[in-house]
């Protein structure tokens, strides 16, 4: 989408008035893709062309909103329907209601889902492209969890989970079977471990443990790729606003805008 140069500069937030914008343009201090532009009505696509003010690159303010939530126990990652409300269910979206602008609240989506009894790292955003980019199984985004089990974790169970286990799901008399991808297991103790996996099928970790004859009693997501929840010091049930630059750096290992 094209925008006039003076409108772009006014929205950047570095000029104190429209007159300052015009002066910068007329004095030849603004370049678009390396070319000095002195026409305030010059139109261009800011997503495709670089704008410089002297030695400084300019960009429009971030239009999408990103939150990192430390998801609490007992909340689902969808908006409540009437039946769920009658059952007394709670939604993670309620944690944001009344605390952010309505326009932002109505556009929020969770990046993937944690089940009702899983806690921890959850990105909530208005950016649909980011949701797809992280949840797309082809991108193999790694998620790391702290797990506690009901029974002692045997060597055989550890080997099976590491290499991939067969999952069988029956839904409306239709049986779906698949083998989980290999996982990385660390800090293995008698009843707990840290598990890293690069796929995110529904209730997959719980089903993995059930398949090897055990059961998960506690499941807490610690991180997504190199974005670690503890680094943000967000209490359970609280959230903080984050930037796309952080997401790109720690999850996608780059500094490009999604």
Image: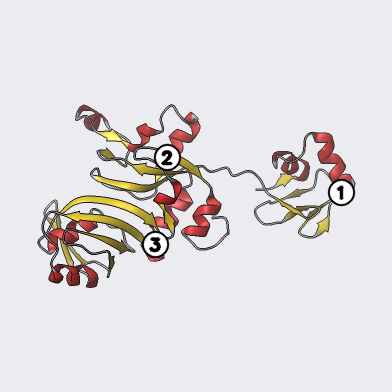
* Left or right position of 49 against 17: left
Disc assigned to residue 57 = none
Which residue is label 2 attached to? 239
* Left or right position of 2 against 117: right
Name the colouring of the figure. secondary structure
Q: Earlier in the sequence, mark 1 or mark 3?
A: 1
Depth check, mark 1 against mark 3: the one in front is 3
Task: Locate residue 68, reporting x and y percent.
Answer: 43, 45
Q: Earlier in the sequence, mark 2 or mark 3?
A: 3
Whether the residues at callouts 2 and 3 have beta carbons within 8 Å, the answer is no
Marks 1/2: CA–CA distance: 44 Å
The C terminus - image quarter: bottom right
Whether residue 69 is situated above or below residue 160 in the rendered picture: above
Which residue is label 1 attached to? 38
Marks 1/3: CA–CA distance: 45 Å
* Left or right position of 123 against 195: right
Which residue is label 3 attached to? 141
- Secondary element at image label 2: strand
Marks 2/3: CA–CA distance: 22 Å
- Secondary element at image label 1: loop
Q: Residues within 10 Å of mark 3 (few under 14, many from 20)?
A: some
């Amino acid at each position: 989408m094209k925008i006039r140069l003076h409108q772009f500069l006014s929205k950047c937030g570095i000029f104190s008035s429209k007159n300052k914008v015009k002066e910068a343009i007329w004095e030849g201090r603004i370049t678009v893709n390396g070319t000095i532009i002195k026409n305030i009505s010059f139109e261009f696509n800011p997503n495709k062309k670089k704008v410089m003010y002297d030695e400084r690159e300019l960009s429009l303010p971030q239009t999408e909103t990103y939150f990192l939530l430390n998801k609490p126990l007992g909340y689902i990652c969808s908006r409540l329907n009437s039946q769920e409300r009658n059952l007394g269910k709670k939604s993670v979206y309620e944690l944001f209601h009344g605390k952010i602008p309505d326009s932002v609240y109505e556009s929020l989506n969770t990046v993937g889902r944690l089940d009702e009894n899983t806690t921890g790292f959850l990105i909530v955003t208005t950016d649909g492209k980011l949701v797809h980019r992280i949840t797309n199984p082809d991108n193999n985004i790694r998620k790391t969890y702290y797990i506690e089990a009901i029974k002692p974790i045997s060597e055989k169970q550890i080997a099976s989970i590491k290499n991939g286990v067969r999952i069988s799901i029956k839904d409306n008399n239709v049986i779906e079977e698949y083998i989980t991808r290999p996982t990385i297991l660390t800090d293995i103790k008698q009843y707990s471990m840290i598990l890293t996996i690069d796929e995110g099928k529904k209730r997959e970790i719980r089903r993995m443990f059930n398949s090897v004859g055990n059961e998960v009693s506690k499941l807490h997501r610690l991180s997504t790729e190199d974005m670690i929840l503890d680094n943000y010091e967000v209490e359970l049930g609280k959230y903080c606003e984050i930037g796309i630059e952080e997401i790109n750096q720690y999850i996608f290992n780059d500094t490009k805008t999604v």
